[in-house]
Structures are given as C-alpha cells and as structure tokens.
Amino acid sequence: MSESLKNSQQFGNVYKNGKSFANKYLVMYVCKNELSINRLGISVSKKVGNSVVRHRISRLIRESYRLNDSISNSGLDIVIVARAGSKGKNYSEISSALMHLAKLHKIISSSEPDRN
C-alpha cells in the first residue's frame, strides 16, 4: 500500500532530512515517516522536456514503483527526481534505474528478481 506526497512541505522534509542516491536517470531521496505505509513523490522538472515527456516519465516511474511496491520496506517517504537523461528512455531502463537506487537505499533486497 502506498500514498503520494501531496505538498511542498512534505517534499521539503524529505529533501532536508532524507538520504539520497543517484544514477544516470534518477535521484532517490528516502526518509522515514511515522506511518505504516510508504508515501511516494515524483518530481520531473522542465529541464527534462515538455509536459508530454514529463508526464510519460512520471507514469513510467509510478508504474515501476507500483509493480515492485510489495517488496519495499514500509514507513518511508520516497521522492524520485527524474534527470534530463531519462528523456526518451523506455520502461525497462527506468525500472532498472529505480531498482538500482532501491537496492542502494536497502529498501529492497538484492536477491529479489527485477520484474520487468
């Protein structure tokens, strides 16, 4: 089960107090929350592309997270920031980048198979 981060105060809290790892396509910030569920926030700036491109990247990230949500730890606020390099990438590239960052944050076990 997962919700989304709603306002800039929640995003700011994760940016300020969370730990971050990055790769070529994404940056992931993770911070503990006081809830029993994860909350996901996705940020795709205008540097990535026009609104169609930004929304597509956002959907790919959300879908990749949704399909792998059951194997994540709970009680976390997660913000995923798309980098300009993510423009034009397909689902499998975005998903593998997301899983790579999740393994670095130790919110997913590296022995779990990647479900592309």
Image: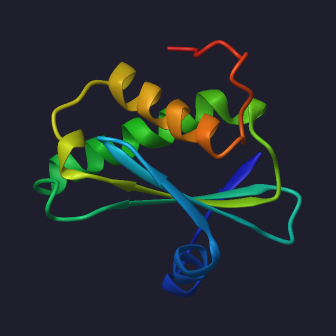
Q: Is residue 101 left or right of residue 56?
A: right
Query: Measured from the top left, where is residue 5 in percent x and y?
Result: 59, 68
Q: Residue at x 18, y 51 (%)?
A: 84
**Compared to 91, does 51 lie above or below?**
below
Q: For residue 33, which quarter of the picture?
A: bottom right
Furthest residue in direction bottom, as rendered? 9
Q: Residue at x 76, y 32 (%)?
A: 70
The tally of labels here is 0
Quick one: 27 or 69, which is closer to the camera? 27
Q: Residue at x 23, y 29 (%)?
A: 89
Query: Measured from the top left, where is residue 73 in percent x and y?
Result: 80, 44
**Compared to 62, does 35 lie above or below?**
below
Query: Measured from the top left, where is residue 24 in percent x and y?
Result: 29, 41
Q: Is residue 19 left or right of residue 1?
A: left
Q: Residue at x 43, y 41 (%)?
A: 61
Color scheme of the displayed model: rainbow
Quick one: 104 or 72, which is closer to the camera? 104
**Compared to 87, does 114 lie above or below?**
above
- Image quadrant holding the N terminus, namely top right
**Compared to 72, does 35 lie above or below?**
below
Q: For residue 86, which quarter of the picture?
A: top left
Q: Is residue 47 left or right of residue 107?
A: left
Quick one: 46 or 106, which is closer to the camera? 106
